[in-house]
Amino acid sequence: MTRVTAALAAAAVCLLAPAAARAKTLTFRFGPVSLNGYATEIGNDMTRAPRVDGFVTAMHAQLVDRAGRPVPQQRVMLHHVFFMTDGRAGHGDCSPAGSETFYGTGEEDQKIVLPRGYGYPVRKQDRWRVGWMFMNHRHSHARVYLQYRVTVDTSRALTPVTPYWISVSCAGSKIYSVPGGGAAGTTYAKARTWTVPETGRIVAGAAHAHGGALKVAASNACGELLASTARYGTADDPIYHLSPVLHEPAPRSMSVVTSRHGWPVRRGDRLEVVSTYSDEHPHSAVMGILHLYIAKGRGRTHRCPAQPHDVREHRLRFPGAPGRTQPPKVTPQLSTLDGYGVAQPLLGPLSGPLTTLAGNATVQVRNVAFSPRRLSVPAGAVVRWRFRDPIRHDVTLAAGPRAFASPYLERGTYRTKLAVPGEYRIFCSLHPVTMSQTIDVRPGG
């Protein structure tokens, strides 16, 4: 479906005075990737690696068109992308991995620049893999490339770092849901304890999160060590004015924090990684993933070492920067295609018969549809979705009293208990225009 093309552009980058001539920035492209109207595509593919011995000291990825011009999110969204060194054991996540993830970004548009003197080691024989998810927000066909710039230093004087990807949720697809319904200003935190595998110092950190996020942080018994914080665009940001809304926009920016001195840790230290979201409104299928870069060496010598004095926060510019700290309320909408193939929001009830049940319910997911499409159950009923389709789908709350979402499934069953009365408007996030459902949860149990 895709092919890899590469365009190399060398530029001298002065990162270290004695090794300035050994640092260069390479530009590569993965693609093209073709997306039909309103399509969401997911892939995991081999891509071009620098093919040199040295250290990656900076990296940034974005979607571009054939001419190399950036593609705005309101046209095609880079939901997420992560780069892996194939065959090098991964670290830090919920289960063993055969690839080491070393850089990622998404809607938060992060550029990793490691502190002076540090780098991620690469070798000539390395094979890189890229995991990606792109969303076409328009009815017309789109053709995009993933362009990534890699700064490589071929000197041997740098201190190597090991990347650790730590998810607060180890469920399928690493997702969880923020239920919503809280009072103004309330938050929802999900935490996971992570055991530090090596003695040294954390020199950089960043996070991947979804709409509604406030921050993802790492703490020890003495308090918060570091945090990647969210910023959202201003009210006139085009990403908040799409119609219909097929996806809750993520933060425009999640900060990258660095320190050359570093946050010292010891092997066996237990860090609490906490993902914090606003709980005023439901947020379905969210993530909280912290990216840490650790340089092996001398670790902490005190129980509660002082914060490093040289901490820096990095953000790329974005529409409306410096932006807002609080997430706007942007609710996904159910939709239908008009006679021109353009999606229009469905604000009222869905078409089709209403199935009313006195207790639990089973919904069939097949032929790219939910059956029944309209359902009514009493509060406290358990609803099961049985997946029987040759392509992947999910069940995601678009709007309603409480959030929930399933992982992507072709076969299997997802279930949830609907305890709070109200109308639940549901769609498949991979096929938001063609797969929708409403469930009326009646009060009284």
Image (cartoon, helix red, strand yellow):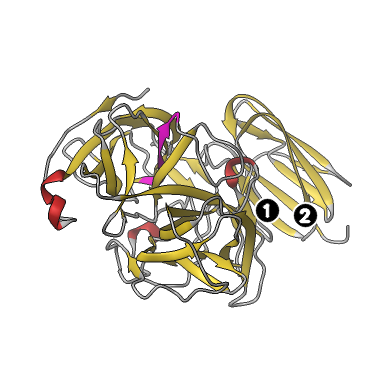
Report the residue marked by disc 1.
424
Q: Residue at x 31, y 56 (%)?
A: 114
Asked whether 98 or 406 is in front, the reply is 98
Q: Is residue 366 left or right of residue 341?
A: right
Task: Relative to 2, say whether 236 is above or below.
Answer: below
Q: Look at the magenta stretch and give its main secondary structure.
A: strand
5 left or right, relative to 430 = left
Question: Which stretch is magenta?
Answer: 77-87
Q: Residue at x 33, y 41 (%)?
A: 121
Task: Identify which residue is drawn at 37% across, 39% down.
Answer: 139
Magenta stretch holds residue 100: no
Q: Is residue 63 visible?
A: no
Q: CA distance from mark 2 to mark 1?
A: 8 Å
Which percent across, then down, holds residue 145?
Answer: 28, 36
Residue type at tag 2: Val
Where disc 1 sits, the SS reads: strand
Would residue 277 be found to the left or right of residue 63 on screen?
Answer: right
Can the viewer see residue 188?
yes
